[in-house]
Amino acid sequence: MVKILSVAEKPSVAKELSKILSENGHCATRDGFSMYNKCFDVPQCKFRNQNASMTITSVSGHMMGLDFDDAYRGWNSCNEVDLFHAPIKKKVTESNLNIESTLRREAKNHDTLLLWLDCDLEGEAIAFEVIEVCRSSNPRLQIFRARFSALIPRDIFRTMTHPERPNEHMSDAVNARQEIDLRMGAAFTRWQTK
């Protein structure tokens, strides 16, 4: 039986998915490390025409933030022009550490990751943040992307039968925009203020 970890973009979507995918709308609910992001256990469902069990949880939008290395974070640490090529790092923000802990715990016990994030560029970028966190505790995960337009049974069951793969190019577009925003915003803000 396939064991699926499903991750939704927000708690309300995870809850609705659990109602649609579980028999009679009932499933076991467990706490995650974040009090807002519960885990819903669906003991039996179909995925790609195979029997499966599923745990559904959620994030709360982007999990990671982009920032300069410590050597470049101070206002007087460098010339503003240096910020255009200074090293940057992407990491889970402090407000999302509990969600990260839930994802790491759950990923260890599953063989498939199914991402139920918004079907836009930002949703794809969040998908790759979730993939990075989950693969850090289970590198063998099979990764799939749910493409749906509404939280209605027809769309949900269609994507359970025909899931897609995440699109790294879409995620790269968001990462490029975030990096440009960080570099230009920091450089011009410091330059104008000084």
Image: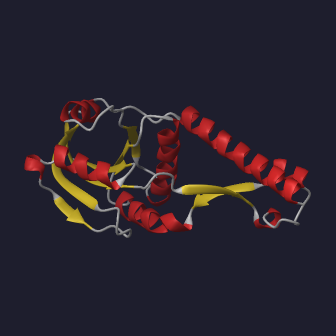
Residue 43 relative to residue 55: left or right = left
> Please, which residue is most extreme toward the front here?
193
Quadrant placement of the C terminus:
bottom right
Return the residue nearer the eye: 193 or 146: 193
- The image quarter containing residue 177 is top right
Whether 47 is drawn above or below 12: the answer is above
Residue 53 relative to residue 110: left or right = left
Q: Residue at x 56, y 39 (%)?
A: 171
- Could one spot residue 192 in this view of the protein? yes
Q: Residue at x 88, y 54 (%)?
A: 191
Question: Residue 128 appears at what percent x and percent y?
Answer: 51, 45
Question: Residue 30 appears at what percent x and percent y?
Answer: 24, 66
Residue 30 relative to residue 25: left or right = right
The colour scheme used to paint the residues is secondary structure
Q: Residue at x 78, y 46 (%)?
A: 184
Question: Residue 72 appears at what percent x and percent y?
Answer: 81, 62
> Please, which residue is most extreme toward the left here?
24
- Could one spot residue 86 in this view of the protein? no
